[in-house]
Image: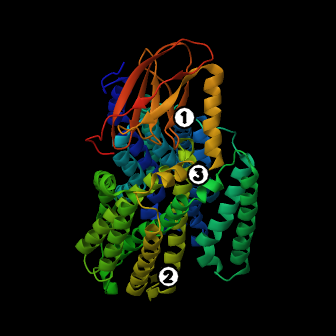
Amino acid sequence: MSQATTHPRGDRAARGIGGVVPVLAFAGIVVAVMQTLLVPVIKDLPTLLGTEPSNATWVMTSTLLAGAVSTPIMGRLGDLFGKRRMMLTSLAVMVVGSLVCAFTDDLLVMIVGRALQGFAMGAIPLGIGLMRDELPREKLGSAMALMSSSIGVGGGLALPVAALVAQHADWHALFFGAAGLGVIAMLLIVFLVPESPLRAQGTFDVAGALGLSAGLVLFLLPITKGSDWGWSSGLTLGLFAASAVVLLLWGVMELRLKAPLVDLRTTARREVLLTNLASIMVGVAFYAISLVLPQLLQLPSSTGYGLGQSMVVAGLCVAPLGLTMMFTAPIYARLSSKYGPKITLILGLLIIAIGYGAGLGLMSAAWQTIVIAVIVGAGIGLAYSSLPALIIGAVDASETGAANGLNTLMRSIGTSVSSAVIGMVLANTATHAGPVDVPTMEGFRTSFLIATGAVAIGLLLALFLPGRDRAPAEQKTQLRASSEEEANLERAEQAVRALGGFQGRVLAPSGAPLARAKVTLIDHRGRQAGAALTDGEGRYALEVPADGAYVLAATAAGHAPHAMSAAHPGGERPVEVNLALPGDSEVLA
């Protein structure tokens, strides 16, 4: 017997839209704040910590390295043990790190605390994975866009607030504020965000985590310190070579494991590989403007090109970068629904290029920097919002945490490369202004040209991504591209046959099978008892915890949701239930 489309799962989803999305987006913003928390006081860190400038840079570098390492690790742990649980763990570690920093002026202790703060970057892909598992398809696009953009939003909004605090209070207050935000985010998640029922098969790959961590540290360390050590020095080149060897051995090991930390076969798929490479370029473009504009605004007007603004005003001028990224999230959902995430990514990259091109001639007034920030922010917002949709569309649901963790890692590598290269350019083109060296207009413009070049490479990569429309046979190849996905489906069907449950197919009005439709099992109390995604032939398999009455609810992109009641008599024999979805939905998919 068919029911109306307003069913317990729909009611839960409606409640989730009011709580899950803003809470997870807020958590993402809190995590991203850690990246720019100390930017307003970065030039004063050597004095504040009583150390040399080269040593003080480790206060920023440690956060970057820890964030890069933690994202794929926390993504995999979330897939295995629960995304909500691991998200709370990430935020708890961040709170501990903030409190460590708040009570010290010692360089080494500060570096440890900042590394713990950076560990929370793993919460971004976990939040995207939770949205994928909990929200209906018609709301997923704008929700993921908002979560993905939170990286830029948090970084942009933190600048003026952190500058205001640093200018009028002791700088340790920044860390107390960060700890407070982390506690608030944790409480909101505990009370408003449910745990995902989806779990990946296998165990956690400890050796893979250690190998990836070592390889990334060896790679990112010379990138962040190459300007100090010299790009052709033995230490820099030796670390790059060691990184290549470690990552190569790590890759060979991962390919031989049944449950690797990163499924390199999935990562090597055309969609995933090109999206991750494009993510690096977007990361370069995002961080370049964050480095250039604050310095240009704060340089004294006596230089002939500096805009002579205070720390707080400079932060306010750059804040529209993050605000615009936030406002583009709903725009992205509409564009992506109509044209697909590939076109949205291309459009975002084109807007970024326009912004940087305009910036080459608009650097003579504070209002001009705001215009640049708005244009570039809009482009980065569209580009960042497209990335998780492209990744999720190419991987199995049980892999979304790890896959988005790897994608966030690619962005971190992009920001690391941007920081190192732009820092080197500004240092090599600096001029003497009294006792200190200051960046020149030539250095600023060269930095913008480098960012524009990165955008051009990203645009080229995006053009080679598969289009939205493809033949059904190609869809089946994409959705069933790896033997691991086949094995996961077979294990689910075996479990249903052994324990009893529901199985069947999800079909379109024409009778064609619907791939990657979500089927949710709801018990007689209205609680979710299980969930599964259909394979390329529209098949699903769900276990039941006990015999009795259930509701099977199915949702798929471009179709209205549908629910059907069914009873399981118990025993080992599965019950066959096919779900035919109604016609195209009026809502965004």
Dot 3: element = loop
Q: As shown in the figure, which amino acid type bears the numbered disc 1?
A: Leu
The residue singled out by tag 1 in the image is 198
- Between 110 and 271, the one lying in front of the other is 271
Q: How far apart are marks 2 and 3 (CA)?
A: 43 Å
The residue singled out by tag 3 in the image is 481
302 in relation to 18, above or below: below
Q: Which colour scheme is used?
A: rainbow
Q: Nearer the viewer, mark 2 or mark 3?
A: 3
Where residue 18 appears, as percent x and y from the top left, is 32, 34
Label 3 neighbour load within 10 Å: few <14, some 14-19, many 20+:
some
Task: Name the side, left or right, on which 249 lies relative to 557.
Answer: right
Q: Which of marks 3 and 1 is nearer the N terminus?
A: 1
Q: Which of marks 2 and 1 is nearer the N terminus?
A: 1
Determine the residue positioned at 33% across, 21% down.
Answer: 3
Q: Distance between the residues labelled 2 and 1?
A: 47 Å
Q: As shown in the figure, which amino acid type bears the numbered disc 3?
A: Ala
Q: As shown in the figure, which amino acid type bears the numbered disc 2?
A: Val
